[in-house]
Structures are given as structure tokens and as C-alpha cells.
Image: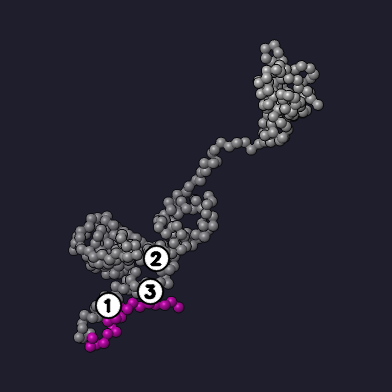
């Protein structure tokens, strides 16, 4: 069974004793207007009585922030024509056009009727100088041009309440405006899926869709960078020698040695390739020796085979030929 809530403003006149009504005839009207004010949308009594409905996400995500005038109005106009009144309270709502605050007693689908001009009310819940102080404004009736923005002041509290709800359920989005075509209620209810996939391509696409309504393509710079080959490779050192005797090509896959003497340290290395080269009228052989930095056969060179050997030749100038032999 649904609960019917009766506004006190509708029954207060019948609750006063007859002597009060006779001696103070304006008390009924005063109390009626007082309860009408606090029972209007976002009024203290309305919030207390309907808090169970306001905490529902579905009722907070369909708030209408504004509409616009469909015709200019003068300072004495009591009917205000607008594009639409959907989302505004049926009666005694507060609207603001430019700096003027207006209340009304009724509405049609495209107009507010019974308007009281130059009204007073809360125009903002955030003071520019004191962050936890709301702004209560007074105003004067004024002329307003066609297409002027008509703000819905009746939802200011609900907007602040919705912001707090977003901060708890979808932190990071409390100050963000969602895309107008987004089903905010559904997005917030399923926000757990977004946060659980945070940092993935899917979460980035959801983010841009929620905020801008755009389908995006994820491009990573690393996918377009030049990368080193993942294949194994060899690092070889080459030694060009002149044949003295024997078959040099038979040195492939054998080890050559450098004997130690007064000028040269001992060393050894494995020959992986032999290539004949011609320079002028002479034949030479280029021996490829696998370096210890190679990946395929690490550690096949022992000692400073080439560097020390060549340095000794350059310094002493005593060796004109080097005999390489295998064992």
C-alpha cells in the first residue's frame, strides 16, 4: 500500500480555532504561505518528507537545470513564455532570469503563470568568499529579452546532494558534466565495472563516451617505435692474415692460440668463418672470431687476443709476420 503525504499548507486553515480566525484574520493566510514555502521543492519540509526519494539515483539524474524564454517580457508580465517547463515544479517554484528571481503559482507546458516578480531566494549554494555559505539574493523586476536563460533555482539543493552522491559512488566525476545523451543513472549503477577495469583500453573508451559521447581509438606511441630485433645475434671480430703454409680454410670451427713471450700475452679464440680476399696480386684470409659478447657462443675468446697483439706490433715494430696455427 502506497503512503499518501498531505501538505500542511492545504489543511492549516481548517486547524485554527474560530476565535483566532476572527481576531486575526490574516493568520490563516500567513501560515498557509509559510508552509507553502517550506513544502515547495527543495524546501526544508519537502527535503525531510521526501528524503527517501531523493536518495534514489534515478530521481537525481533527471534534473532540469534551465530552459529559455520564447518571448521577451516586461517588468509587469505575470505570464512567462518559455521553450518548455518540463522538470520545473508544478507550483511555487523559483526561477531566475538574469539577476531577477521569480516565483509562480502554476504552469503550462510552455509557460509559467501567476508570476510574482522581483522575488527573493537562494540563488547559489556556494559563496565566492565563504565556501560553506549559501547565497540569499533579493531582486527587482526587470525586462528580459527573448532567448534569455531561465534557471531552475528549485533544484539547487538536489544538485548539491547529487554531487555528494557522485563523490561517494563515482569519485572523480563529482565536478564533471556527463554527456547529455548518457544514461547517468545506469552509468553510476554500473560504475564498479568501470573502476575495476581502470587503466585498460575499455575503461578509456568508456570515459570518453561518458564525458564527450565520442568513440575513441587508443593509440600507443610505443607501437610505432623502431624496436631492436628479438632474434639471437653474433658479434664477430675479424683478423686479416697472410698465408705462410697449410690450408687456412681448415681452421673453421677450430681454436687458434697466441703463445706468450716477452712482448705478447697468451690468448685463444674460436674461428667461426674463413673468407679469402684479394688485395692487388696477393691473397689474404679474413678470420672471423666470435666475441665473448655474442649470444650464440659466449666466452669463446680468452685473454686480450687482438688488442694486445696489435698494440705490441705497433709499439715494437719487430714482428713483420704472424704465424697462426691450430692445435
Compare residues 288 and 11 and report the one nearer the observer.
288
Compare residues 107 and 243 and report the one nearer the observer.
243
Rendering coords of residue 229 (x, y %): 62, 36
What is the residue that sits farthest to the top in this orientation?
A: 281
| Quadrant holding the N terminus | bottom left
Rendering coords of residue 10 (x, y %): 30, 78
Reading the chain from its start, which is encountered first: label 1 or label 3? 1
Give the quarter of the image for residue 324.
top right
How far apart marks 1 and 3 lie (CA) works out to 19 Å
Is residue 77 shown in magenta?
A: no
Q: Which residues are magenta?
A: 1-20
Residue behind mark 1: 32
- Say left or right for 44 vs 1: left
How far apart marks 2 and 1 lie (CA) works out to 28 Å
Residue behind mark 3: 48
| Quadrant holding the C terminus | top right
Amino acid at each position: 500500500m502506497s503512503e499518501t503525504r498531505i501538505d500542511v499548507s492545504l489543511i492549516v486553515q481548517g486547524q485554527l480555532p474560530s476565535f483566532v480566525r476572527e481576531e486575526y484574520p490574516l493568520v490563516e493566510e500567513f501560515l498557509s504561505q509559510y508552509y507553502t514555502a517550506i513544502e515547495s521543492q527543495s524546501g526544508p519540509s519537502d527535503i525531510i518528507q521526501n528524503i527517501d526519494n531523493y536518495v534514489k539515483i534515478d530521481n537525481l539524474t533527471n534534473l532540469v537545470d534551465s530552459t529559455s524564454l520564447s518571448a521577451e517580457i516586461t517588468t509587469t508580465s505575470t505570464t512567462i513564455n518559455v521553450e518548455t517547463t518540463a522538470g520545473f515544479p508544478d507550483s511555487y517554484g523559483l526561477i531566475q532570469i538574469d539577476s531577477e528571481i521569480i516565483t509562480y503559482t502554476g504552469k503550462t507546458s510552455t509557460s509559467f503563470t501567476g508570476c510574482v516578480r522581483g522575488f527573493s531566494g537562494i540563488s547559489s549554494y556556494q559563496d565566492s568568499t565563504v565556501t560553506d555559505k549559501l547565497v540569499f539574493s533579493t531582486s527587482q523586476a526587470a525586462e528580459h529579452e527573448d532567448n534569455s536563460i531561465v534557471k531552475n533555482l528549485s533544484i539547487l539543493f538536489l544538485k548539491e546532494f547529487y554531487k555528494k552522491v557522485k563523490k561517494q559512488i563515482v569519485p572523480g566525476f563529482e565536478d564533471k558534466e556527463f554527456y547529455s545523451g548518457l544514461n547517468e543513472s545506469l552509468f553510476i549503477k554500473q560504475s564498479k565495472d568501470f573502476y575495476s577495469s581502470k587503466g585498460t583500453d575499455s575503461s578509456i573508451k568508456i570515459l570518453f563516451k561518458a564525458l564527450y559521447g565520442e568513440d575513441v581509438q587508443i593509440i600507443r606511441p610505443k607501437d610505432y617505435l623502431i624496436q631492436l630485433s628479438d632474434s639471437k645475434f653474433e658479434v664477430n671480430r675479424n683478423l686479416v692474415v697472410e698465408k705462410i703454409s697449410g690450408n687456412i680454410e681448415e681452421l673453421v670451427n677450430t681454436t687458434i692460440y697466441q703463445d706468450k713471450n716477452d712482448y705478447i700475452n697468451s690468448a685463444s679464440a674460436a674461428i667461426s668463418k674463413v673468407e679469402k680476399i684479394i688485395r692487388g696480386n696477393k691473397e689474404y684470409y679474413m678470420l672471423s672470431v666470435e666475441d665473448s659478447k655474442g649470444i650464440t657462443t659466449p666466452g669463446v675468446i680468452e685473454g686480450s687476443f687482438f688488442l694486445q697483439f696489435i698494440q705490441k706490433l705497433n709499439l715494437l715494430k719487430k714482428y713483420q709476420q704472424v704465424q697462426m696455427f691450430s692445435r
